[in-house]
Amino acid sequence: MSFDPAPLLRTARGRCPRCEARLPDAPFWDVAPACASCGLVLRRRGGFFLGALVWNYGLVAFGYLPLLLIPGALGWIGWKTVAWAAAAGGLILPWFIHGFAWRVWIGIYYGFLPDQMGREMDD
Ligand SMILES: [Zn+2]
C-alpha cells in the first residue's frame, strides 16, 4: 500500500483533493458535502465520519494535552490549572478543529485510496 501526500496537502489547505479548487464555504466546525467544482463527495456515508472523529480526538489528546502537561511538569503552572485547562480544552477545542480534522481525514483517505476519487457515489 502506498500513500500519495498530494490529496492531504490539498485538503489541509482547504482545497479539493481531486481538482484542487477551493472547497465551498462551510462553518469552521464542518466540511462541505461535496466539491462545488468537480462534485467529489466529501461526506461519504457508512461511518465515514468516524475517521474525522479519530483525527479530532488524536489532535486533542496528542497535540493539545501534552502542551498542558509540559508546563505542569516543569512547575510553571499548578496541576489544578492543568486539569481545568485540559477539561475545558477537551470540551471546547474539538468543536473548533472538527472541520480541519475532516479535511485531514479526507486527505489521508484519498492519499491511500486515490482510485476512490473517481467514484461519485458513496459506499
Ligand atoms: Zn473538486
Image (spheres, grey):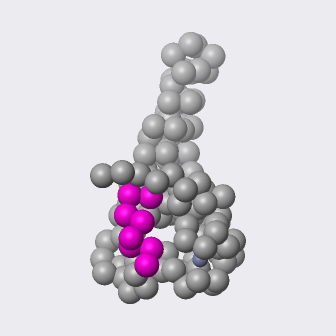
Front-lying residue, 17 or 51: 17
Which percent across, then down, holds residue 39?
A: 55, 85
Q: Image point 31% across, 81% down: which residue?
A: 123
Q: Is residue 38 above or below residue 113?
A: below
Q: Is residue 100 visible?
A: no
Residue 86 shown in magenta: no
Q: Image point 58% across, 61% down: which residue?
A: 11
Q: Image point 65% across, 64% down: which residue?
A: 14
Which percent across, then down, holds residue 96?
A: 60, 58
Q: Image point 54% across, 38% down: which residue?
A: 64
Q: Is residue 63 visible?
A: yes
* Image-quadrant location for residue 36: bottom right
Q: Is residue 56 above or below residue 21?
A: above
Front-lying residue, 43 or 36: 36
Residue 113 shown in magenta: yes
Which percent across, then down, holds residue 1?
A: 30, 52
Q: Is residue 67 left or right of residue 44?
A: right
Report the label total. Answer: 0
Q: What range is drawn magenta here?
A: 111-118
Q: Magenta: predominant secondary structure element?
A: helix
Q: Is residue 26 left or right of residue 122?
A: right
Q: Is residue 64 above or below residue 79?
A: below
